[in-house]
Image: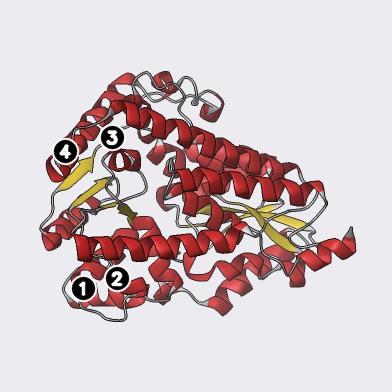
Amino acid sequence: MSDRAAASDRVQLAATPLAQAYQREWFQELRRRVFEEGVPYALTNATTPHEVFDVFDMPYVTNEWWSGLVAAKRASGRYLDMLEERGFHDGLPHYGAIALGTLLDGENPDAPWGGLPRPAILCARTVEQGSERQWSLMAEACGAPFVPVEVPGSSVLYPRWWEIARQSWEDVFETHRIDRVVGCFRDLVRECERITGREFDEERLREILGRVFEQEECFDEVRAIVCEAPKLPVRLSEQLTNTMTAQWHRGSDWALAHARRFRDEVRERAATGIAAFPGERFRLGWVGVGLWQNTDFYRAFEESHGAVFVRSMYMSIAADGYLRYGLRDPLRSLAGRYASFNETLHVAPWLPEWTVWDCRRHRCDGVVIVNLGSAVKFTQQALEAAGIPALVLDTDAVDTRAWDDSAMHGVVEEFLETRLGA
């Protein structure tokens, strides 16, 4: 097994380049359709109901994906500097600010992948301080409507919420909160009807969500395989690529087929004893947003310390955050999903409790935390109390100006050596 595992270390999953190629081709086709055919598209963020746009056959670009792409191309600093030069303060949430900078710098011939076309509609959940104003500014720059999604705060807390939220989401996330989110979604539906001249089709939304559920169940299976395999069968960087590319197209025939392809390939690798890194001795969890500007960081400590990153929030939330069964009222099922995202991914005690459980399930020896906002200390304390050493990286995952590669490597190496004995 060791010889085969060692040989596999140089081979990507076959699914990974397919996902990368699909995303590039999809974006170029979107740009062509927008510029040549005048097709309206939406600019939105991750915690909004993309499936509504699919009902209207309206393509959309997710702000978090775009910001991650810009960061990966080492171009985020350019746009953030440009915004400061134009009088915007540096406290703007960087995920959204990068898109704002891109839209305001629309004539730049060197923009990643040709740059963002001007959207016909913008939609975002307004959580962070200043985010609603930021999205309003983008809408003004594009001459397009902005539909905010507002979610009231929770008044109850269910311990181990992930165990019951798939079926009992109405109770867990509270009827009055879901009602408010449904109201925002209906505002979005009305704008989409106005822009496209088409009527909302509830049955089509129901069909799309049925495919979404099957897609997320595939990711749930992959998570179980990663947790249970003696050694990690697929690197974290490839988990991110395959999971998130499908998520940005979730509910489509391609996304479901790709989720199945990804699951089947990981299952086969685990069954035949193939390890991403045969010398694995320590398993690390990653908590917070992906390090899109430098995904090679996730394999940087394999040869030197035998440490592999095995877990991120992205594949885990695919199962625990997206699956909200029951499609009698599909718009309400969607609202049950998005009434919970801020708490489960960013707020204590929802996030720390789930993170501890998920990291234990992944058999993590230690955890690295980045970009969690107010939940950083609570999550670190919860992990430490559970006996899982946790390191907080003081950096911005999408701002290339803030990243010091040598310093970050040194901090993690010290953590591995002093806390894990690597």
From what the image shows, is residue 120 above or below residue 292? above
**Mark 3 crowdedness (10 Å alpha carbons): few <14, some 14-19, many ≥20:** many
Residue that badge 2 annotates: 115
Label 2 CA crowd tier, 10 Å (few <14, some 14–19, many 20+)? many
Disc sitting over residue 327 in the figure? none
**Residue ID at (26%, 41%):** 56
Of label 3 and label 1, which has the lower sequence position? 1
Label 1–label 4 contact, CB within 8 A: no
Closest to the camera, between mark 4 and mark 3, is 4
Real-space Cα separation, disc 2 to disc 4, in angstroms: 27 Å
Residue 352 spot, x, y in % from top left: 53, 41
Q: Is residue 329 visible?
A: yes
Residue at mark 1 to residue at mark 2: CA–CA distance: 7 Å
Q: Nearer the viewer, mark 3 or mark 1?
A: 1
Is tag 1's residue or tag 2's residue first in the polypeptide sequence?
1
**Residue holding disc 3:** 151
Instruction: Residue at 79%, 56% (x, y): give it.
Output: 274
Q: Mark 1 points at which residue?
A: 106
Are the residues flagged by discs 2 and 3 in contact, CB closer than 8 Å?
Answer: no
Distance between the alpha carbons at the discs numbered 3 and 1: 32 Å
**Mark 4 residue element:** helix
Quarter of the figure that contains the N terminus:
bottom right
Closer mark to the observer between disc 2 and disc 4: 4
* Alpha carbon distance from label 1 to label 4: 28 Å
Q: Label 4 belongs to which residue?
A: 193
- Estimate the x, y position of residue 36 in percent, counting from the top left: 21, 65
For the point 21% across and 73% down, the residue is 106
Residue at screen point 46% across, 47% down: 247
